Image (tube, rainbow, N blue to C red):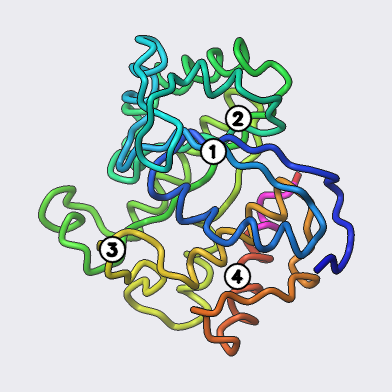
Amino acid sequence: MKIYISEATKMKLLTIGNSFSQNSTRYLPAICEEAGVPLTIGRCVIGGCSLERHWNNANNDTPAYGNAYDGEKTMREMLESDEWDVVTMQQASHFSWRIGTYEPFFSNLVEYVKAHAPKAEIVIQQTWAYRRDNTRLTEEYFISQDQMFMLLKQNYQAMADKVGARLMPVGEAYRIHQLISGDEIGELTRNPDGPSHANRLGEFIGAMIWANVLCGIELDKISFIPEEVDPAAVPLAKAAAKAALAMYRK
């Protein structure tokens, strides 16, 4: 049902990402439908995929895309298959805090997208820090949740500044939600699918961030609530998303 008209009249979106882009777009179609924004989503998505792997696939014309996590199309074919309004990028979560993993692959992908989808705006998803009790932090990376967040925040901002791209501050919204809710661990990423994926409330927050940044959909006008989300949790989720958006709005 069409509730109101947002700033966007349509959105053709291609994600170059991994499970974290899948997380943030789970509820995006429903939010856009409510707002009367026709949405097309194409996916260059591989689980756990880094910028380096995406770039190698693009550079070698590897047929790895087309479906949610696999396919028989190259990135070039995906980019040229439609007139995309937006192409999104992000780093794999396990590399997001390490600045040395971004380049030259990020810049190479940006130039590749510009060559094969010249009308598309490149927008970056800021991903999120792992839960405080995630053993990868303590046994592999030897950093805290706070350190992971601050490092990935700096890295995404540096990449956005380098190419003049907008950021979707999903990680910031998760961080704010954790702080204002008194959550010591980071429960938005407590998910049976793994210790770092967003749960349904986290996915709803991510989708609201994407809907606002990409389509201009006002959070206060979103009446859709996923069946899996407790309605009582929505006001705090929207407050966190609004606060994050306000921090990054230019």
**Helix, strand or loop for the magenta stretch, by majority:** helix
Mark toward the viewer: 4 or 1:
4
Q: Which residue, given by chain and number where applicable, does mark 3 sit on?
A: 193
Mark with earlier residue (4, 1): 1
Q: Are marks 1 and 2 in contact (CB under 8 Å)?
A: yes
Mark 3 to mark 1 CA distance (whole Å): 28 Å
Q: Which residue, given by chain and number where applicable, does mark 4 sit on?
A: 240
Residue 178 position in % (x across, y down): 45, 73
Q: Are marks 3 and 1 in contact (CB under 8 Å)?
A: no
Q: Quadrant of the C terminus?
A: top right
Mark with earlier residue (3, 2): 2
Q: Judge the density around disc 4: few (<14), some (14-19), many (≥20) Cα neighbours within 10 Å.
A: many
The answer to whether residue 90 is magenta is no
Q: Are marks 3 and 4 in contact (CB under 8 Å)?
A: no
Q: Secondary structure at mark 2?
A: helix
Q: Is residue 122 found left or right of 66 in the rendered image?
A: right
Q: Residue furthest front?
A: 72
Q: What label sits on residue 161 in the rendered view? A: 2
**Quadrant of the rendered structure where residue 164 is?**
top right
Q: Which residue, given by chain and number where applicable, does mark 1 sit on?
A: 157
Mark 2 to mark 4 CA distance (whole Å): 24 Å
Q: Secondary structure at mark 3?
A: loop
Residue kind at label 1, given as amino acid type: Gln
Report the span colored magenta: 245-249
Mark with earlier residue (3, 4): 3
What's the residue at 85%, 45% (across, down)? Answer: 9
Mark with earlier residue (3, 1): 1
